[in-house]
Image: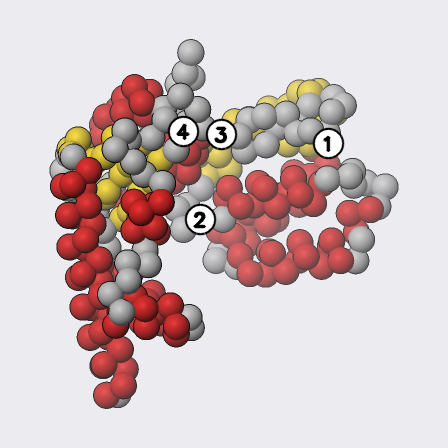
Amino acid sequence: MERKRISGQWYELASIYVPDRLVPVLKGYREQLRKGEGCEAWQDMRRRYNEREFDGKEWHYGDAQYLLGLMFAMNTITPIDMRLLGYANTRATDELEREVWNMRKDEPCTRMSLRVRLGDFQRAAYWDFQRAVEQKMRSYKTDFYLYDMKMLARELGHKPLLWVVGQSYTMHEVLDAEGEAEAWAGTDQEERRQRFVYGGKDDTWMGGALHTLCGKDDDYYYHDGAMLHHVSRDRFKAIHDRYVQRVMELTKEKIELTKAA
């Protein structure tokens, strides 16, 4: 039975047990991520690993990989609240709430809850997304409950969305033409940008997914900023194609403005 994930204005991404010895380290990295110092956090992790600090008596085999996994789950532009909720002598779990294979012994752990804040609109709309997932997906539902929810907490109700639900995956695309054009105009991957902007090659994440992965048996959705619509694959692709065309046009404009400056 699915646990209650929404409490008031908060949605719980994961409930995990972190070894007490690693909690101060993780809290320090989380504070750096919160301040936008993700690069510094990753560099410190790399330093600790290269200097074999993780081989000390206070560290266990696999601690570095474990911390990297949790940092990946928290390293997002969606603000994540990390709450310490209690203690237990148990086995460590990861962001997917599974026991960690290389921490098989019971040890003092802190129960940690990773949460995102939802607005009233997002909280009400959540049930339509959850219903679509539970009706369709047979495995890997974490694609939605952990990863998609970070995006929905940030974007739902603010920008239109395209969303695909398959039996073992979800895919989403936030329709932010201005933001994506900024990224394309500023990328240092000149050859890729040339293919996209001037060669007309759909090099977006969703474009690749539609070409190689998403099939006729998947469910396709479009959220227009007000409500979620179940649409045909053809309509979904038409919305995506119009969006890509707009991104290309805006990117060209931004490149030309840069040249003229």
C-beta proximity under 8 Å, tags 3 and 4:
no
The image position of residue 245, as x and y in percent, is 18, 61
Q: Tell me the element at label 4.
A: loop
Q: Amino acid at mark 2?
A: Thr
Crowding at mark 3 (Cα within 10 Å: few <14, some 14-19, many 20+): many
Which disc, if any, is residue 14? 3
Circle nearer the viewer, 3 or 1: 1
Q: Quadrant of the C terminus?
A: bottom left
Tell me: residue 243, above or below residue 165.
below
Circle nearer the viewer, 2 or 1: 1
Tell me: residue 30, above or below residue 124.
below
Question: Which mark is first along the chain, 4 or 2?
Answer: 2
Question: Could you tell me how far apart the alpha carbons at marks 4 and 1 are, in whole angstroms?
Answer: 26 Å
Question: Which mark is first along the chain, 2 or 3?
Answer: 3
Give the residue at x 65% y 39%: 66
Q: Nearer the viewer, residue 168 or 162?
A: 168
Question: Could you tell me how far apart the alpha carbons at marks 2 and 1 are, in whole angstroms?
Answer: 26 Å
The image position of residue 34, as x and y in percent, is 48, 51
Question: Which mark is first along the chain, 1 or 4?
Answer: 1
Question: Which mark is first along the chain, 4 or 3?
Answer: 3
Tell me: residue 146, above or below residue 172.
above
Residue picked out by circle 1:
102
Residue picked out by circle 4:
168
Q: Amino acid at mark 1?
A: Asn
Residue picked out by circle 2:
76
Question: Which mark is first along the chain, 1 or 2?
Answer: 2
Q: Amino acid at mark 3?
A: Ala
